[in-house]
Image (cartoon, helix red, strand yellow):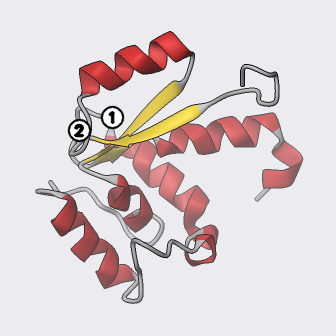
Amino acid sequence: MRRDDYDAAWAVCDVDSFSVTDAARVAREEGVALVWSNPCFEVWLTMHFDNCTAYVEDARRAEALLKRCLPHWDKANLRFGDFRNGVFEAARRAERLGPDPDNNPSSGVWRIIQAIKSTDADDFAQ
């Protein structure tokens, strides 16, 4: 970004792993847009297949919910192809959950999808 190679930089953080206050301060200082998944990124991935509206205790529970939707899912081998067809539905579901990081569950990743769509609408037409 400092070399003008990018229009924007985003960071996606898990509430269960980072201090919200510290991450927000660093992101602001660095000019990075920050979004949260509460309690973790697996909530966002689950939304590609199903609504995720009930409180999620922790990352372990979020992983179990995702494995119900995608039994072969492996955190060490994330395959975009498994999620490609549900991106826009996940964004709609996540937007309806309310603000991240306060709500559990929540994910602000929908804002990244919205930014990409508005930047290059022809490539992301539905």
Query: Viewed as shown, does residue 9 lie left or right of 117?
Result: left
In this view of the protein, which residue sits in the foreground, 112 or 95? 112
Q: Quadrant of the N terminus?
A: top right
Query: Viewed as shown, does residue 111 lie left or right of 15?
Result: right
Distance in Å between CA atoms under marks 2 and 1: 6 Å
Which residue, given by chain and number where applicable, does mark 1 sit on?
A: 100
Determine contact: label 2, label 1, CB under 8 Å.
yes
Which residue, given by chain and number where applicable, does mark 2 sit on?
A: 103
User: In the rendered image of this protein, does residue 15 appear above or below residue 79?
Assistant: above
Helix, strand or loop for disc 2: loop
Name which residue lies at 80% across and 22% down.
3
Residue 95 percent coordinates (x, y): 44, 42
Name which residue lies at 48% across and 66% down.
48
Name which residue lies at 68% across and 27% down.
8
Amino acid carrying mark 2 in the image:
Asn
Helix, strand or loop for disc 1: loop
Return the mark for residue 92: none
Residue 58 percent coordinates (x, y): 15, 57
Query: Viewed as shown, does residue 60 lie left or right of 1?
Result: left
Name which residue lies at 78% across and 53% down.
124
Q: Residue furthest front?
A: 3
Amino acid carrying mark 1 in the image:
Asp
Q: Residue furthest left?
A: 57
Residue 21 percent coordinates (x, y): 26, 19
Residue 71 percent coordinates (x, y): 36, 88
Q: Quadrant of residue 70?
A: bottom left
